[in-house]
Image (cartoon, rainbow, N blue to C red):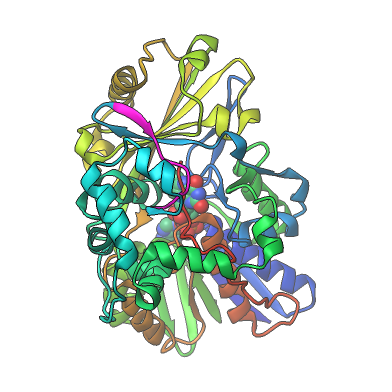
Amino acid sequence: MKRIAIIGGGISGLSAAFYLERLRQEGVPLDYVLYESSTRFGGSMFSEHVDGCVVEAGPDSFLTEKPWAQTLARDVGLEDQLIGSNDPQRKTYILVNGKLVVIPDGLMFMVPTKLLPTVFTPLFSWSTKLRMAAEWLHPPRRAKEDETVAALVKRHYGPEMVDRLADPLLSGVYGGEAATLSVRAVLPRFADMEAKHGSLGRAMLAARKKLHPLVRQAKPLPLFTSMKTGMQQMVDGVLARVNRSALRTSSPVRELNFRDGMWQVASNGATESYDAITVAIPAPAASSLLRAAQPDLANELGAITYSSSVTVTLGYGKDVLGALPPGFGFLVPRTEGKRMLACTFVHTKFPHRAPPDRALLRVFLGGSRDEEILSVSDDKIIELVRAELRQILGVSAEPRFSRVYKWKGAMAQYSVGHLERLDRIERLRRTLPGLTLAGNAYRGIGVPDCILSGKKAAEEIAGPSPRITEVIPASSDPVAPQQVR
Ligand SMILES: Cc1cc2nc3c(=O)[nH]c(=O)nc-3n(C[C@H](O)[C@H](O)[C@H](O)COP(=O)(O)OP(=O)(O)OC[C@H]3O[C@@H](n4cnc5c(N)ncnc54)[C@H](O)[C@@H]3O)c2cc1C
């Protein structure tokens, strides 16, 4: 019987536990224990029900394009609880000089694919629009080395595109900056498109043309998918399917050692021996735990930095609902001098998450440039968010309720050279038999990628199994995922 320890009970560790449980039930001789340091499972995935509304503390949905979260929901019997975002009303604004300007139709991340909306949008100056036209003649890039997202975007469209679009979009997804995030890790398709076609606009159209006509004509799937009563459903769904006696909360792993081919896991004053482990915690914490076993691996893991995030949800009545512009919300470029990074109109994005006569706003703060927000009191954060909402939306009503959630060091930052670092991590990891790594530090920060990382860890530990080894489909969408909150 193979004994396995999973360290970290966020969605990555839960996914590993679920897929190990499935193998166990199929007769694979294994046993596992899931160690979680806090009092609950789910990590940053956590929903509350307040005043008739679903309040998401962390992720509120996931990209439909990446199938692994839907697969997990189906596997735990929650298929009928999957819901899509309300895309007919999807419209996102950017704050420009204090005013909300809608992102024009046909803009894929930052690549214009439709002429007229691009020409007439007030989002960009004429000089940027001229750069967009000239971009169609951009030569392919010969250099192979990684660079920042900002460098690629600037080369194609100029600095205004970085400030107004690339940076706010990336701070919404990664809590990071275009000036430091790696283009190969964060927007690999853009790097490939540039190498092959030069112009991103031409590459995008070429990719669209290549799609099968039936695919092109098909009704697009909703951009985001979520769970009917909140993302917590996914956590609870997994917990209901795994072996309850294997689950340990309030059990921080303090020490890991690899001796005589076995892993020694120390938690709550006891040390237990395992044949294999899945370390599913943020990379800096994984670095500390693995230092004794493999210092070089610990150094590489320790070099992956994280940013923090704060979400604030405010519930309002009918008066505010009528005063808001239509759409999913807005993004705030740093140059606007505000503390908030983005605001989602939850009642539009997922209408059933609030009664029909309510407005539910979710605001994001923090990120790599504002770690100080963590030390601001909840009351002060609400005050400053309300002041900024007053300036931007003219909303001065008293909220019916408010919630603040602080996530310290929750968002991995894929800096330039991230993929090369992952290669080194992989080589070093393989020097330690039975070690697998999962989580948002590696090949995707979103919920589906985290779930896939846990699933792959389970598969690797248990050995090849035709039942759960799947071919990962290449995306049919040529556009880099645009995750606007
Ligand atoms: C505010 C916010 C909004 C987000 N929005 C979205 C979104 O809308 N869509 C999307 O796809 N993604 C989103 N993400 C990203 C996504 O939610 C995360 O990347 C993902 O949930 C991370 O899961 P994880 O299990 O890898 O890590 P975590 O959730 O961080 O879980 C790690 C767990 O390990 C535990 N742990 C740490 N150290 C130890 C130890 N020594 N021993 C035992 N346990 C330990 C922690 O307590 C924690 O429970 C968001 C993230 C945040 C913070």
Residue sitting nearer the eye, 249 or 161: 161
Answer with the quarter of the image where residue 212 lies.
Answer: bottom right
Residue 326 highlighted magenta (yes or no): no
Q: Residue at x 56, y 45 (%)?
A: 61
Can you say which quadrant of the picture contains the N terminus? bottom right
Residue sitting nearer the eye, 292 or 484: 484
Vertical placement of residue 134 versus 436, above or below: above
- Where does residue 334 sit, x and y in percent of width and height? 23, 40
Does the image show residue 466? yes
- Where does residue 282 sit, x and y in percent of width and height? 39, 61
Does the image show residue 38? no
- Where does residue 398 sit, x and y in percent of width and height? 41, 10
Answer with the quarter of the image where residue 425 lies.
Answer: bottom left
Residue sitting nearer the eye, 247 or 393: 393
Vertical placement of residue 29 versus 338, above or below: below
In this image, 34 relative to 257: left or right?
Answer: right
Vertical placement of residue 65 versus 348, above or below: below
Residue 108 highlighted magenta (yes or no): yes
Q: Residue at x 46, y 41 (%)?
A: 485
In this image, 373 relative to 21: left or right?
Answer: left
Vertical placement of residue 293 versus 42, above or below: below
Residue sitting nearer the eye, 132 or 66: 132
- Where does residue 391 sit, x and y in percent of width and height? 29, 19
Q: Residue at x 52, y 20 (%)?
A: 359
Answer with the quarter of the image where residue 151 lies.
Answer: bottom left
Magenta-drawn segment: 99-109
Q: How many marks?
A: 0
